[in-house]
Image (tube, rainbow, N blue to C red):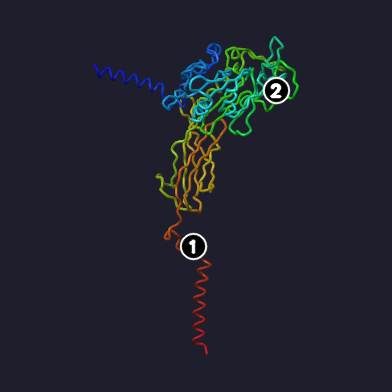
Amino acid sequence: MAKLAIAIFLAISLVLFSRLSFSRESLTGRRILVLLDDLSIKSSHSIFFNSLRSRGFDLDFKLAEDKSLSLQRYSQYLYDGLVLFSPSVERFGGALDLGAVLDFVDSGHNLIIAADSSASDLIKSVATECGVDFDEDPSAMVIDHNSYAVSETEGDHTLIAADDFIESDAILGKNKIEAPILFEGIGHSLNAGSSLVVKVLSASPSAYSANPSSKLSNPPSLTGPALSLVSVVQARNNARIMISGSLSMFSNRFFRSGVQKAGTSAKYKKSGNEQFVTELSKWVFHERGHLKAVNVRHQKVGETDEPAVYRIKDDLDFSVEIYEWSGKSWEPYVADDVQVQFYMMSPYVLNTLSTDQKGLYHTSFKVPDVYGVFQFKIEYHKLGYTSLSLSKQIPVRPFRHNEYERFITTAFPYYGASFTTMAGFFIFSFIFLYHK
């Protein structure tokens, strides 16, 4: 009986552990901490949260000022993703602070930040550390007198219908977003010192950031092309971050609202918010655009085993398999821009790999006439996809003394000169000795 109880306990523990632990087959962990200013956001933004749950995520809702907050225990992270829907929080509760959030991202985890006109210095600081700068004016909002959303009341044109999307199937999916996005909030600019931040939803050229309730006394600091509404970051460790200046953009009200952009006749019964946010969250949590490379192989042409060393001028084959996570399974990744380097201090060979459309990439080339320690290197960086950085080291030796050709064609003039010298010396000696 005792053995049966122990077996049942172990089975339950195993199930719980497999449920809570990070799954390599799902790529992203299932545990997400959602920090809220007010628990009412759970219901007002329930469509977005239900979308995450339907995709297998476990959401843990807490107030941002909860004194029990902690991202890790015994040096192990309790969550795999963090959603900050608490724009007005001045200070996180418990053990959570700015440094803890940044460490969370530095460890490879993912982050979503949603701000609005009440954004605190803390939230703005988190965004700044991620590479974007919100407008310093605390009363500023994005205003657009040309691309606002048409409504029954004229309003101050802070409710914007934005449709300037990034062109990337990896980030926003293959299905085009037809309806404009309803956006009401604050804008931000990209930090010039960060090359990792990308605009996903940009404001129109006529948009600007200012206080909607007062007249402009000075030109606004953020206008037109410099003004971003939603941006994303993919860090060098492949952690992903989404930064939005509008918390309302995620709300049920905006998801269900119809939209008509000023100056156009097209009316949409439903805004593009739900599709936009859903597809973007799939990218943030690595449900799309995640690559892996396996089975890196190289061998001499005509052979199957990898050699321990190559000789200069050997002909070799190189191959690697690359797959992309589709959200449910690994699918072959198909592209025509994957390259391999044969590298020693600098690339001696740079070849574009051919693909069989089933995930296998391959090429053939001749080892350069230089000996030393080389590397096969793949450095693949493409917008919306995780970076691939692979290297495999292999030495290259020169010819041995008995591997050279017996007679080298290019040396025939030297052979001829040697025999001519010997013949001339024989003739000279004969004439010198016997001529009177």
The Cα atoms of the two marked residues, 2 and 1, are separated by: 75 Å
Above or below 422: residue 311: above
Q: In front: 418, or 6?
A: 6
Residue 151 in percent (x, y) is at 68, 11
Residue 288 in percent (x, y) is at 52, 27
Residue drawn 45% across and 40% down? 296
| First of labels 2, 1 by sequence position | 2
Give the quadrant of residue 37. Answer: top right
Residue 181 in percent (x, y) is at 63, 19
Q: Quadrant of the N terminus?
A: top left
Mark 2 — residue?
208
Task: State the SS at label 2.
Answer: strand
Would you call the spot at circle 2 few (<14 residues within 10 Å), some (14-19), or many (20 or more)? many
Give the quadrant of residue 218. Answer: top right
Image position of 341 (left or right of 134): left
Mark 1 — residue?
408
Above or below 304: residue 99: above
Image position of 24 (left or right of 281): left
Give the quadrant of residue 160. Answer: top right
Residue type of the residue flagged with mark 2: Tyr
Residue type of the residue flagged with mark 1: Ile
